[in-house]
Image (tube, helix red, strand yellow):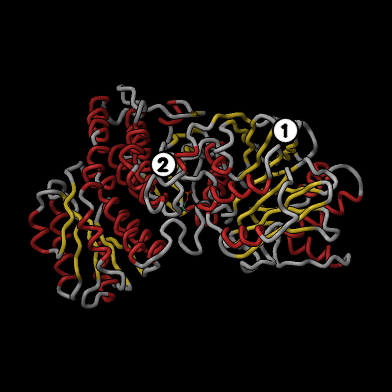
Amino acid sequence: MCGIVGYVGPQAAVEVVGEGLRRLEYRGYDSAGVALVAKGGVVTEKRAGKLANLTEAISQRSDINDQHTGIGHTRWATHGVPNDRNAHPHVSSNGRVAIIHNGIIENFTRLRAELEADGVELASDTDSECVAHLLERQLDTGGDLADAMRRVCNRLQGAFTLLAVHADAPDTVVGARRNSPLVAGVADGEYFLASDVAAFISHTRSAVELGQDQVVTISPDGLAITDFDGNPAAGKHFEVDWDASAAEKDGHDFFMFKEIAEQPKAVADTLRGRFAGTGEISLDEIRMSDQDFRDIDKVIIVACGTSYHAGMVAKYAIEHWNRLAVEVELASEFRYRDPILDRSTLVIAISQSGETMDTLMAVRHAKEQKARVLAISNTVGSTIPREADAVLYTRAGIEVAVASTKAFLTQLVACYLVGLHLAGVRGIKFADEVAAIVTELAATPDKIATVLSGMQPVRDLAAAMPNADRALFVGRHVGYPVAMEGALKLKELAYMHAEGFAAGELKHGPISLIEDGTPVIVVVPSPRGRSVLHDKVVSNIQEVKARGATVIAIAESGDDIISAHADHTVFLPVVPTLLAPLLTAVPMQVFAAELATAKGLDVDQPRNLAKSVTVE
Ligand code: M6R
């Protein structure tokens, strides 16, 4: 979703802002722009399409070079098609104020009508442009840019991160946030504002987290924060624990390949130091007592996309280990169906970014209903963990590719840890039982590495089918959410029609999609688990084979029964049934990424998608 960068300091702002935008590209965008301010006034440039278009346009300008204050934006269109006109920055009528915005201003229709009634001619179709004109009007009534920003913010409804510059304040950038991310970077004599720290990580690792409904001013003299009423406020300082090299590709063609390869480490890091040996895990931040956990009589997991699939796997593990009912719900649906929850409900919100608006709104709804909220997130200090009662951070490191891979595996680990923690605290499992599962978990990084080292056949299979127009993914038990995740990966990366089904559902409809040669990827349960599951999947394979499907099975090493039925079998190391998704998801990721590569597509930034979806 939109990326935002602001800079004041001794360097050429166009360079710093441009580099920040490049580092925020992973969030997804369809146009980009900058505004630079110096004594002479505000200059802007903006272009639809990739950053290269903007860079080319800037290179033709003689008036964009040595300004030391600037803002930049990558836009993911909500109101108004992606074109030059709707790209940010937007400028006020007198040309002296420029703004950039991430989010949606819900009352923009009213604000726009009010401005138009006053004779303002809006130059774009966006909700954001209103803010530039409103700021100009407020500045006309007195006060500085920060005063104007506070007054305007009090009129806005919805979600926004805003940055503004003003020709009369050439050393200042003013920012504001409500329900949308904004973080400040602090270096010697220079300051940054950005959607996330990746934008300024090559300049400083010293960061300040801005709170809800705050306005921040950066200038060479420092950083000042107030609430929307002008009362002084404080941000929370933190040091970023990764550096710029973590955001580079490390020799891979795409970040996604690098991130797939990093999974053994990401899983090991997420497990490290979490288990005390007494059946308790260490949550990172906890505002819940053991008694709170014991009082829980129902768990509801809310999440979107890949994180939702992690939640579906968690349901199997938490229910099995705790004998406690677990519901899993798409965050975007949750609050609109009036869910039944109270103070003995534990809502687990899973979000890699910690900023997904649908999940954030589900969290807020849960808290209004007095439920306890535990966040699982990969982004320290992001909004969802901040608003939750307890937090378990995954330690995947920055995930740049839009398609989630290492974040998914580490979410699974976090869910397992939460399930075991609950089982321990609630006295459902003895410490040695918990320890036995944790030992199995601790062995998974090596097994994931083994899976990765055997992926050439999967790459070959993917490379051989760039012309396939559809694929089905099926599984049973924990293999079912993995099948859905495999289909999601293929959809988002290879733009193919792919669906994930519970294997038992095939004959209730989807089997009619199968034609000669249709690829069906089957996640096969272990024959050592509940044998009925394995037998049923064998039957399902026969059903689709009989209708012409090409079956690619993902099965446990030594499962000779499956290899006799499937066209291709990918064998994986033996792992306990509930932990199997940590391995079975990996060939799906490789398959989708390779197929997208074979089709010549942008693996890291698929069309229409954003990494962090900060609108509902
Ligand atoms: O940051 P979140 O985990 O809340 O993001 C949720 C989804 O938007 C995300 O998982 C999305 O589905 C990925 N692109 C899937 O690869």
Say few, some or many: other residues with alpha carbon within 10 Å of mark 2 (under 14 / 14 to 19 / 20 or more): some
Give the residue type that dot 1 points to.
Answer: Leu
Residue at (43% x, 61% y) in the render: 602
User: Which structural element holds mark 2?
Assistant: strand
In the picture, measured across the screen, residue 151 lies left or right of residue 218, that is right
Say few, some or many: other residues with alpha carbon within 10 Å of mark 1 (under 14 / 14 to 19 / 20 or more): many
> According to the image, label 1 marks what residue?
223
Q: How far apart are marks 1 and 2 (CA)?
A: 44 Å
Give the residue type that dot 2 points to.
Answer: Lys
Q: Do the residues labelled 1 and 2 touch (CB within 8 Å)?
A: no
| Quadrant holding the N terminus | bottom right
In the picture, measured across the screen, residue 154 lies left or right of residue 510, that is right
Residue 249: image location, x then y, percent: 42, 47
Of the numbered discs in the image, which one, if any, rests on residue 298?
Answer: 2
User: Which structural element holds mark 1?
Assistant: strand
Residue 334: image location, x then y, percent: 50, 53
